[in-house]
Amino acid sequence: MIEYKTIKDLGNLSGKVVMLRADLNVPMDENFKVTNTARIDRTVPTIKNLMAQGAKVVVISHFGRPEGKGDMKNSLSHIVKDLEQALGKKVTFVDDCIGPKVAQAIAQMSQDEILLLENLRFYNEEKKGDETFAKALTEPADVYVSDAFSTAHRAHASMVAAAKNCPAAMGLLMAEEVQALTAGLNDPVRPLIAVVGGSKVSTKLDLLNNLVKKVNKLVISGGMAHTFMKASGIDTLNENNSLVQMDMIDTAKEIIATAKANHCEIILPLDVVVAKEFKPMAEHKTVSLSEIPAEGWSLMDVGEKTVALINTKLDECKTLVWNGPLGVFEMKPFDEATNKVAQHAAALTQAGKLTSVAGGGDTVSALDNAGVADKFTYISTAGGAFLEWMEGKELPGVAVMKK
């Protein structure tokens, strides 16, 4: 198993300046009010740990998509109050992330204070992975710590080059993420089941091709299940009543063949919920696959038989990795299948029978909606990084932390 550098490997941090790369890219409304503090809250333990060791903590992060231009809309100054509230400590904001202002602010820091620097993406060099910019970033620091797993799939200056300029290690959150995802996919207790949803097969090809070689059972759900159902001989599906991608039928057949060769059982819907309109509480009915109307109705969810099948398969497994809902969970009552399967997975987890790891923006929202986000073994803060990990790709921001 690969070993990574963590805070424990940094030695005595008393009096040292620690530059902490966090992900504070939180959702914000038009009045610059943070609407979800989850990413702030998840990095608080690392900040408190470093401060408890006597370190001077300087926090850096990206925010939004300013494309190399400074603007108030994308300023990290808006999250100072939320960060202070989460930490119970004074947070001083510096309106730059490199240069004399930063050096001066660090020199004047008190022991019980945190510095928050301005948005890294106000500089184009950040996204380019520029080494000179990375050196300017870490120049005032003694130590670099990364807690931004959700950005670890990007080889940005603050994620990779910066970690090579001074002693570096993973923060508690990043170490936790890597450990959980390794246990979920790289070194799981088997049988291992994956639930994968999404609207299109074409957007998750790498993921599916990797999973059929790694998992024992694969539940394919959401819109992309329609293409696999068509490839499996369900002739009632067409482009008027579903999200079938006709140009991906042969690809789906190849993935099914690869799964069979690797002894991976693919689980597809047995029944579906169709609706007259694409809106909440639309007229709907549950039908068997042979009864799907040719037009005038849209597939919105899977039915009770499918839910029972998936839950039975969960009962047979020891580890679950989940990315993507089963249906259009944002609209009631088309969240029912996702809710019931999520609640069953949560119950198995709480009973100690299942290790459950989930990630991706829609997945986290779906589990929140089902009321079980705190009942899974681990919920990843990452979207793209979680997906690329599941695709079997090496993440630059993680690789740089290898011992």
Image (spheres, rainbow, N blue to C red):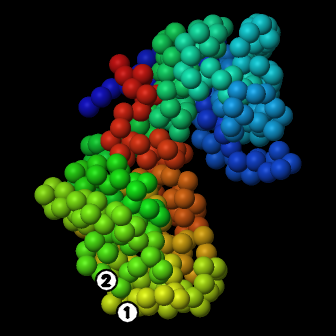
Question: Cβ–Cβ below 8 Å for labels 1 and 2?
Answer: no
260 or 336: which is nearer to us?
260
251 on left or right of 36:
left
Tell me where residue 344 appears, x and y as whole percent: 41, 71
Circle 2 SS class: loop
Q: Would you identify the image quadrant in which residue 88 lies? A: top right
Tell me where residue 69 appears, x and y as whole percent: 75, 27
Q: Which residue is depicted at the point 86% across and 48% down?
A: 31
Tell me where residue 95 appears, x and y as whole percent: 81, 22
Give the spatial CA distance, label 1 vs label 2. 10 Å
4 on left or right of 231:
right
41 or 215: which is nearer to us?
215
Residue 16 appears in the figure: no
Q: Which residue is mark 1?
A: 291
Question: Which amino acid type is shown beneath numbered disc 1?
Answer: Glu
The residue lying furthest to the front in this view is 247
343 or 123: which is nearer to us?
123
Image height of 270 relative to 132, above or below: below
- Count of labels in the image: 2
Question: Which amino acid type is shown beneath numbered disc 2?
Answer: Asp
Q: Which residue is mark 2?
A: 235
Residue 324 appears in the figure: yes
Image height of 148 relative to 293, above or below: above
Circle 1 SS class: helix
Q: Which residue is depicted at the point 81% across and 47% down?
A: 33
Image height of 380 relative to 265, above or below: above
